[in-house]
Amino acid sequence: MKALRIKQGLSQEDLAGLCQVDRSYISMIEVGRNEPSASKIFELCEGLKIKPSDFFRLLEAEYENLKKNESK
């Protein structure tokens, strides 16, 4: 999510405003201290202007890369 936010030139504050959440919530998601609900993921995707399916595709690719690196 952080990479998408930065690529779009959004600050945590910007994204938080678009999603009507506190900036600290965005920060906690980005560092892995909070896991958003499915409905919140849809809101975050709307704020990032991406389809949820694209978001999950990116997550899946990142997960596969992590698994590859762990098996080395």
Image (cartoon, rainbow, N blue to C red):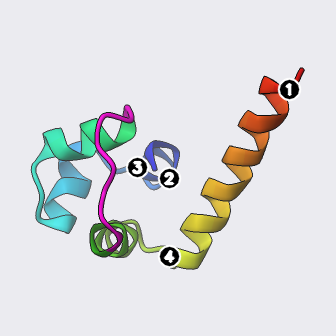
Report crowding for label 3: few under 14, some 14 to 19, many 20 or more residues within 10 A (C-alpha): few
Say what secondary structure mark 4 lies in: helix
Q: For residue 42, which quarter of the picture?
A: bottom left
User: 54 left or right of 20?
Assistant: right
> In terms of sequence position, does the residue under pointer 1 or pointer 3 come before the other?
3
User: 10 left or right of 16?
Assistant: right
> In terms of sequence position, does the residue under pointer 1 or pointer 4 come before the other?
4
- Residue at position x 58%, y 66% in the image: 56
**Looking at the magenta stretch, what is its main secondary structure?**
loop
Q: CA distance from mark 1 to mark 2?
A: 27 Å
Report crowding for label 1: few under 14, some 14 to 19, many 20 or more residues within 10 A (C-alpha): few
Say what secondary structure mark 2 lies in: helix
Which residue is label 1 attached to? 71
Q: For residue 36, which quarter of the picture?
A: bottom left
User: 31 left or right of 23?
Assistant: right
- In which quadrant is the C terminus drawn? top right
Which residue is label 3 attached to? 9
Label count reads 4
Q: CA distance from mark 3 to mark 2?
A: 9 Å
Q: Which mark is residue 38?
A: none
Q: Amino acid at mark 2?
A: Leu
Q: CA distance from mark 1 to mark 4?
A: 29 Å
**Bounds of the magenta segment:** 31-38
User: 38 left or right of 15?
Assistant: right
Which residue is label 4 attached to? 52
> In terms of sequence position, does the residue under pointer 4 or pointer 2 come before the other?
2
Considering only vertical position in the picture, is 43 above or below 2? below
